[in-house]
Amino acid sequence: MAHQSDLIASDILAYLKQQEEKGLLRFITCGSVDDGKSTLIGRLLWDSKMVFEDQLASLEADSRKVGTQGENIDYALLLDGLQAEREQGITIDVAYRFFSTDKRKFIVADTPGHEQYTRNMVTGASTAQVAIILIDARKGVLTQTRRHSYLASLVGIRHVVLAINKMDLVDYREERFNEILDDYRKFAASLGFAEIRPIPISALNGDNVITRSSATPWYQGPPLLEYLETVQVPDNAQGKPFRLRVQWVNRPNLDFRGFCGTIAAGAIHPGDEVVVTSSGQKSRVARIVTFDGDLPRAVAGQAVTLTLEDEIDISRGDTLATPEDRPHHADHFEAKLVWLHEEPLLPGRSYLLKAGSSTAPAQVVDLKFKVNVNTLQQESGGKLTLNEIGVCGLSTAKPISFDSYRENRATGSFILIDRLTNATVGAGMIHQPLLHSRSHWQSLDVTRESRAALKGQQARVLWFSGAQASNLAALTEKKLHSLGRHVMRLSGENDDATAERAGLLLDAGLIVLIDGTAAAAGQIRDRFAGGDFIQVHLAAEQEPAPEQAALILSEELGAPTELAERLVRELDL
């Protein structure tokens, strides 16, 4: 009997060990309203046998009471737990669910489709590695599809499943599937996804969810669950430079002083040198302490306590890093900001910026531009309202340590907090430090290049000559303005006066557009440095172009609007 108990205990321990060693994948479902996000996750839970008996009884009762599938089970009710969600038949809050298969563990976030709950979707996406973008096969790519795809790209998700749902309602037609796929790929080409995996599904019927469906013999790819079990999402956090934000200084007695935190990137060993990024003080790691004993090595994702060989000043909120590759440490930086509050963001208002365990008073110094997430176009504006996204310059009362969000999601993100209500009002992703950080602004050289760098552009003079020069210059100005560039258009009637004004605007860091004659361009070219002056000549097909023209555009190449877009692209303006 004892021998049998030992075998059972051994089997249990082996099972627990197997579960512990399984990989974990975090993913979200997103898309437009009624695309079937909650139904899909409910189906995954149901078919993977992750619904317990009491949940099943409750689900059957709820399906009869508030379900939308008649006598059948409404799988969405496994996720939509709020009373308001069930009354309205929509998802409002982010619902997290855990389930497991023989190959992998999963944490899935079901996010709302309504535009007013975009902030909830951003919250769910912030830790995800894969996004399942659902599209109703009847409706195709919608505004919310574009919005959620952009937001998934914004928070750093690089693997996307394009789940084209409700294929049963379009008779499982391959042509409809390919039509939607083509539309989506054209839109998503600029979003930087590493992979877009299209799968035709019916969440309600289970087609291509767990197993491949006979209703789509033309689809030869994996079903959804097989893809989720096998997708390789590179986690290179351990290969990055070491980062640890100190969450707590542990001093239980006079003989121990440890610095607690979760390693955000890299690996650390006893004897490795570290630097405090705020002060520049260096020391070496003496011990890596955990509840289960000292470790010979710790890597990204582990919560540890480090002790150092030297007594140096370290406080909560400080960052420990490898001395050879330190993070930025500045009090002025540029970031993308998602606004999460009903009260709009107004530049100049004071907030609290929380980055990890570091908190500092902060101001949004300027709102450079807003991003229209439906068209991906840049727009001007003086404030951010609920769910809007903008690129901002922020200033903090003290320097903070950070990496670019693209390099490290953990050390490149922050939230803004209202100082009166303690409400979280914004979520940000840092791009880069700005040159006018208080720590070194006194040593800056103020030049044409530095002024242009603040505007995110290169200062240039473009002289338009030839047929329709004025029209092309006007269209180019509009295109550049839509991209958030600082641009001014002048007339080239008075060569000397025009050249003088253009020189002043160039020194201010602007892009200057002038429409005039080819002869006048040749007369003033020598007043500008080589790369600062570009002549653009629009010629009829047989017309000889002036020798000075740096770029010759033929009228045969397309409409003026197309020429303006090509010009901006080719000159990288």
Image: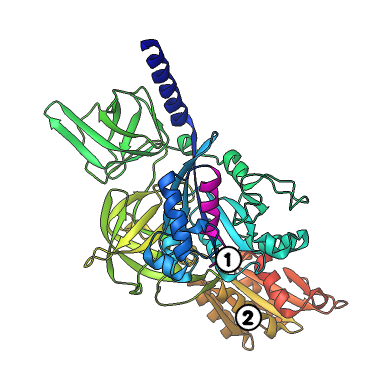
Tag 2: amino acid = Ile
Q: Looking at this rendering, what residue extends furthest in the left direction?
A: 254
Tag 1: amino acid = Arg
Foreground residue among 197 and 379: 197
**Residue 140 horizontal side relative to residue 28, left or right:** right
Q: Position of residue 317 (x, y in %)?
A: 26, 46
Segment colored magenta: 32-48
Q: Residues within 10 Å of mark 1 (few under 14, many from 20)?
A: many
Q: Going from the N terminus, do you reach mark 1 or mark 2 first?
A: 1
- Vertical placement of residue 453 versus 535, above or below: above
Look at the image and tell me in which quarter the N terminus lies: top left
Please give the residue where the numbered disc 1 appears in the rendered image: 146
Q: Main secondary structure of the magenta part?
A: helix
Look at the image and tell me in which quarter the C terminus lies: bottom right
Q: Position of residue 191 (x, y in %)?
A: 59, 58
**Residue 91 horizontal side relative to residue 537, left or right:** left
Quadrant in the rendering for residue 521: bottom right
